[in-house]
Amino acid sequence: MAVLVALAACLAGPAPAAQAAVPASPAVTYTNPIAEKRADPHIFKHTDGYYYFTATVPEYDRIVLRRATTIQGLSTAQEVTIWTKHTSGVMGAHIWAPEIHFIDGKWYIYFAAGATNDIWAIRMYVLEGTGANPLTATWTEKGQIKTQWESFSLDATTFVVNGVRYLAWAQRDPSVNNNTDIYLAKMANPWTITGTPVMLSRPTYSWEIVGYKVNEGPAVIQHGGKVFMSYSASATDSNYCLGLLSASASADLLNTANWSKSPTPVFTSNAATSQYGPGHNSFTVSEDGKSDILVYHDRSYKDITGDPLNDPNRRTRVQKLYWKADGTPDFGIPVADGVTPQRFSSYNFADRFIRHWEYRARIEANVSPLADSQFRVVTGLTGSGTVSLESANFPGYYLRHKNFEVWLEKNDGTTQFAADASFYKRAGLADSAGISYESSNFPGRYIRHYDYLLQVQVPSTATDRGDATFYAQ
């Protein structure tokens, strides 16, 4: 009898874990791009319920702001010019990479600028705004942020760790034959650093020195007791990419030994999704405050005629930032234009996500690469109120069933494929907060996992219904 019981258990497949809780970070979707011809984007969510958005304009002559109650709303929000370059002298050229911050009851915008008599004398400057709404605030110039050298410097950003405010930025060391390194210092006030700056990163890896030897555009996000600083590397064409530094939040951040640097880029161009040169990012949070959002710019084409700085077509884009089991960020790939993808975790195996592996659909934990577990929920190929699940990293490929197994295959344009790849989105069979997908051409059959592989079957037991229920993340 014991042998028969054991055999039956094996035939039934792995037993589900305890019911998964509804994810702490549910799915969010946006439609890209958020803004055309807006580079170096910075989106800040304020306590007043508004998102504030600023970016470099291709004319390099002014600072603009938008606000909206949603990230998507920024795409159509009125844009206001709050400051214009000087007609002579400093702050008279190359107005680059503004960031907006709210510190001690006032607004601050950090930006870089050249001078009319030397457009490449790029330095960092600060504006201070008084008023509840920065689009209508009174702005005053607080002047240049002075550093250890009077040299090419830009991309200032500020953040607080354990009550201490820091400034991170990019600057050229006059004694070194490269472009810019990443530096960090404490701040005495929002426009003044204090103490001796430390260098956190210098471009030395092959992917950091294509075209130019560049580390620039630092951006900080904190998670799980760690401080993560992304930065941009190489020339601002299709070689532009993101690197990552990390440190413990409890460590001395001004000790460079406490920082580690990823030996490989964490976010790069992707030909499959037609996204090139992703970089100069910032971070914000979703409307419900439960998801971290990556904000960045890129172009929709690889080849550029002339100097990339003269090409105006960098666009502002957003997508959800995911976190690995070890607490480190997973940037994934720059997703295709249009609606952003989602991930789908199992109701009864909380750490397992739907993914494709050698084109077979299954559930798996610790999916790498991340994009194998990302799918765009699009209008069903058959229409009629259905949806189809399109692969994030293989655009044009969809989850479809054949012989009641679920595979990822390229849409061949046939009526049969459209039917097999179209599903009705239902409330979760095991939990209405989840999702179940019913086959459009085999009513009553749902996508479910069995032995970790996805099938299309008729659920008849509580276990079946659990296997056919997923949470969007």
Image (tube, rainbow, N blue to C red):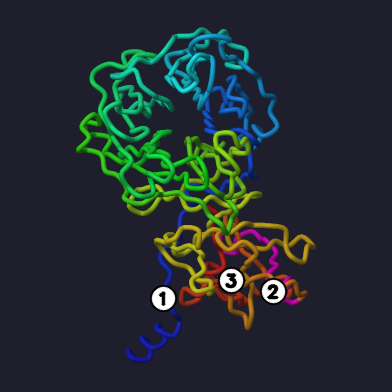
Whole-angstrom CA distance, mark 3 to mark 2, is 11 Å
> Which percent across, then down, holds residue 75?
67, 34
Whole-angstrom CA distance, mark 1 to mark 3, is 24 Å
> Residue beneath label 1, please?
14
> Which percent across, then down, holds residue 259?
25, 39
361 magenta-colored: no
Q: Residue at x 39, y 34 (%)?
A: 220
How packed mark 3 is, by other alpha carbons closer than 10 Å (few <14, some 14-19, many 20 or more), is many
- First in sequence, mark 3 or 2: give its number: 3
> Which percent across, then down, holds residue 197?
26, 24
Q: Residue at x 38, y 15 (%)?
A: 145
Q: Is residue 35 above or below residue 163?
A: below
> Residue beneath label 3, please?
408
Give residue 420's mark.
2
Give residue 205's mark.
none
**Closer-to-camera residue (436/337):** 337
> Which percent across, then down, holds residue 202?
30, 38
**Residue at the extreme right:** 384
Q: Which residues are magenta?
A: 416-431
Q: In the rendered image, is residue 140 in sight?
A: yes
